[in-house]
Image: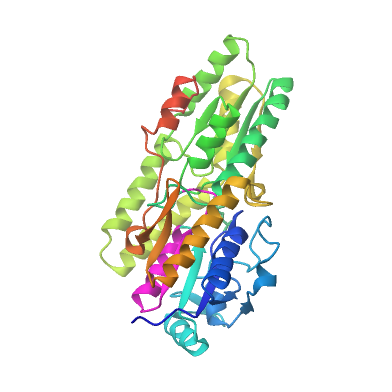
Amino acid sequence: MATKIRRIGILTAGGDSPGLNAAIRGVGKTALGYYGMEIVGFRDGFRGLVENRKVNLDGAALSGILTLGGTILGTSRDKPHRMVINGQTKDMTGVIRENLLKWGIDCVVCLGGGGTQKNALRLHRAGINVITLPKTIDNDVAMTDATFGYATALGIAAEAIDRLHSTAHSHHRIIVAEIMGHRAGWLTLGAGLAGGADVILIPEIPYNVKRIAEAIGQRSKRGSNFSIVAVAEGAMSKDDARIFECAEKKLARAKTLNGKLEAKREIAALEVRHQGNTLRLAQQLEQLTHLESRVTILGYVQRGGTPCAADRMLATRLGSACADLIDKRCFGVMVAARGDGTEPVPLDQVAGKLKLVPRDHSWVIAARRVGTCLGD
Ligand code: F6P
């Protein structure tokens, strides 16, 4: 008979997002109260496993955290296989495995987005029992209907667009609102639809600035001499998208380490150049439309504060299902949301894959039908 799981560890990695504490509570209360396991938190992501940053998560520690934003455990973007220790980059996978053995921890629950899924898979392949939950405001984790954090950020970004409407209207301006989402357009598309943005620009649909200016010009002719442009931080013009695609193909084709490093440097340089994209876009629109343009970068406001009810529920049910799977010794999986239920998905089907907005997604079609310009 398989040995019973007694002691589990939990950590939060990558960018924080609303709902992380609700998920810690969901895993913890089910593991502790229902299955009688012991649960230990590790601070600051995977670094906590290396530097013994343990916190005891007893009933008191898990109480009162459901509605808290951020993560009570702290987070970091440290990778187990490339961690900076005393100024040197080292593979700490072996150290983590030994530490877990020494501390009697049977399994580690990793709460995170795409990067965390990859790191968890590496630990799983190194013989460590891991299980993950999908968190990110970007909603771009593959093989799950949803990630917790998204619904809250969506509400914040949609409300921001609402508020920008009245000031854009009063001043007859274009307001370009930059929304997070990394390389995925879910947050911008959702918030743009919910907030009634006149233009929605997402990475999956590269834009032509002249098309956007034309759409804004049409609105002016109809008497609406203001416009709200919701632009994803990763959105880019058709020309820039082609340049990025070439660099990415070069990386995929590179056979030598030097070739890979060179292609990665090229992509990093393009990413740096991309940083001022929203400001440049607003300037171009001002020149082309002769309407005053302003920029609002929503930034980290989208990640902060209390999780909405939908995220609290999603995080709680995924967390609770996670404890069930641990009890069944189901490791090397992500607990995915599937309709009203959950499903364990092997990490190798998740890691390294991004869930992007399909160009024929129903939200895209609805946006076009209500007259929103998507820039193409
Ligand atoms: O993944 C969540 C996210 O907020 C992305 O939308 C954004 O691109 C990124 O994190 C910002 O990362 P950081 O917190 O490291 O600045």
Q: Looking at the rendering, which quadrant does residue 262 occupy?
A: bottom left
Where's the N terminus, which quadrant? bottom left
Q: Looking at the rendering, which quadrant does residue 315 occupy?
A: bottom right
Residue 128 covered by magenta stretch: yes
Expressed as whole percent of the image width and height from the top left, the position of residue 34 reads: 54, 69
Residue 68 covered by magenta stretch: no
Q: Is residue 181 visible?
A: yes
Of the four image quadrants, the one with ligand 1 is bottom right
The answer to whether residue 184 is left or right of residue 192 is left
Expressed as whole percent of the image width and height from the top left, the position of residue 362 reads: 41, 31
Q: Looking at the rendering, which quadrant does residue 65 occupy?
A: bottom right
Q: Residue furthest bottom?
A: 102
Looking at the rendering, the stretch of residues picked out in magenta corresponds to 114-139
Q: Is residue 91 above or below residue 25?
A: below
State how the image is colored: rainbow
The answer to whether residue 123 is left or right of residue 45 is left
Expressed as whole percent of the image width and height from the top left, the position of residue 149 reads: 57, 51
Q: Is residue 160 above or below residue 326?
A: above
